[in-house]
Amino acid sequence: YDNLKAKGELDEFLASINHPKGIHLCGNPDWEFMLNLDMDILSMDIYTNAEIFAASAGSIKRFLKKGNTIVWGIVPTGFEIFEKENLNSLVNKLEEIWKGLNKNGVDMDLIIERSLLSPATCCLINPDGEKTVEQSFEMINKLSEILRSRYKIS
């Protein structure tokens, strides 16, 4: 089962969907492969995979220029990792990723225009149950407010 067969089957599946098509990945796949699929939304754990994802700047640029959206999973949902982060550290981390992409040819306005935010993963195995996951969603709202203000997004 090689990447051509996987791409063919995934393309066939996505073609059968008559609504916006998206995929969420908590792992670290072949980003070139993913960014070249016929889909509208790519949601991923950028908190963990930033360095490797950023290496695909050319494909990211093409993906966004087609009008597609990237959902930046920047807020960790694992209890231990979440406790180590704060709003400023996460804003800085995300902006560093965006600045790196911008430096490699991806227009910052395009990044901002075609972006959404989310928790990094769908972790529901924390010792505190769903509490950390709920806090991560609250943090997403606060991050969004900061970035909307900083980049003058309504």
Image (cartoon, rainbow, N blue to C red):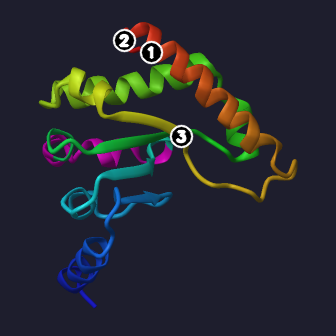
Residue shown at 21% from the left, 58% from the top = 32
Q: CA distance from mark 3 to mark 1?
A: 15 Å
Q: Secondary structure at mark 3?
A: strand
* Pick the front one: 141 or 133: 141
Residue shown at 29% from the left, 53% from the top = 40
Q: Do callouts 3 and 2 mark residues in contact (Cβ within 8 Å)?
A: no
Magenta part of the chain: 48-62
> Main SS type for the magenta part?
helix
Q: Do callouts 3 and 1 mark residues in contact (Cβ within 8 Å)?
A: no
Q: Quadrant of residue 10?
A: bottom left
Question: What mark, if any, has residue 118 been given in the picture?
Answer: 3
Find residue 51 and report its horizontal and vertical position in percent.
35, 42
Q: What type is the residue that disc 3 sits on?
A: Ser
Find residue 47 and report its horizontal and vertical position in percent.
49, 41
Q: CA distance from mark 2 to mark 1?
A: 5 Å
Residue shown at 27% from the left, 29% from the top = 111
| Label 3 packing within 10 angstroms: few (<14), some (14-19), many (20+) | many
Circle 1 sits on which residue?
Answer: 148
| Label 2 packing within 10 angstroms: few (<14), some (14-19), many (20+) | few
Q: CA distance from mark 3 to mark 2?
A: 18 Å
Find residue 138 and report its horizontal and vertical position in percent.
69, 29
Name which of mark 3 and mark 1 comes first in the sequence: 3
Q: Do callouts 2 and 1 mark residues in contact (Cβ within 8 Å)?
A: yes
Magenta stretch: includes residue 59:
yes
Circle 2 sits on which residue?
Answer: 151
Left or right of 81: which side holds 47? left
Left or right of 12: which side holds 152? right
Q: What type is the residue that disc 1 sits on?
A: Arg
Question: What mark, if any, has residue 52 been given in the picture?
Answer: none
